[in-house]
Amino acid sequence: MNEAEITPLLQRIDLGDPHAADQLLPLVYDELRRLAAAKMAREAPGQTLQPTALVHEVWLRLGGDGQPQWGNRAHFFAAAAEGMRRILIENARRKRAVRHGGEYAKISADSTGFDVASPAKDDDELLLLNEAIDGLAAHDPRKAELVKQKYFVGLTLEEAADVLGISHRTAKRDWAYARAWLFNEVKRLRG
């Protein structure tokens, strides 16, 4: 992805250029699709949300063709990370809802000979992690944003550092701190 092309387009969007958003989507689509595919690969098997659908939903939530003001590439991708996180959390909450089977998930009839239900733990873990990240954001917003960029968008630590405008060494320190903090917070939330 060429940052030299994206930032001027974001600035043109801010100035009200109606064609700039049409030019932005092709530039960021492949990167968003790659990031969504990487994120979805880490999700639980049987996930109904596909990477393409996740990218399209994020694009629409970001404003579609009527893009809001973006300060720069980092601002855009931070919003995309937050959008992906919210969509995945909403999806996990929807699947946990009683009307959708609550805490039970179907197991294939091919593997068991009959359909039975088993607890869906992955959605619970995602919701616990989300709550812990919210707590980290209240404690240290930069570290929480790093976690979102790395975990929910799928950026490498170096890419996330570049997006956030911090050094790679700072990102490594922040990542180590955030992991330890989140581990303790998730442990506390589990009771």
Image (tube, grey):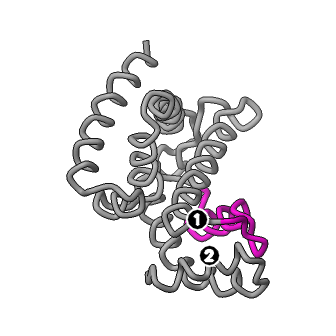
Where 174 falls versus 25 (above or below)?
above
Question: Which portion, as a residue range, is magenta?
Answer: 48-69
Q: Nearer the viewer, residue 121 or 172?
A: 172
Quarter-of-image position of residue 104: top right
- Which is nearer the N-term, disc 1 or disc 2? 2
Q: How many marks?
A: 2
Q: Tell me residue 114's x, y (percent).
A: 56, 42
Query: Which residue is located at x 64 percent, y 34 percent?
Result: 96
Q: Nearer the viewer, residue 183 or 38?
A: 183
Where 43 falls versus 18 (above or below)?
above
Q: Tell me residue 153's x, y (percent).
A: 46, 58
Quadrant that contains the C terminus: top left
Label 2, on which residue?
10
Magenta-drawn stretch contains 25: no
Query: Which residue is located at x 57 percent, y 64 percent?
Result: 76
Is residue 166 in view?
yes
Query: Which residue is located at x 66 percent, y 43 percent?
Result: 90
Residue type at the position of mark 1? Gly
Label 1, on which residue?
71
Quadrant that contains the N terminus: bottom left
Residue type at the position of mark 2? Leu
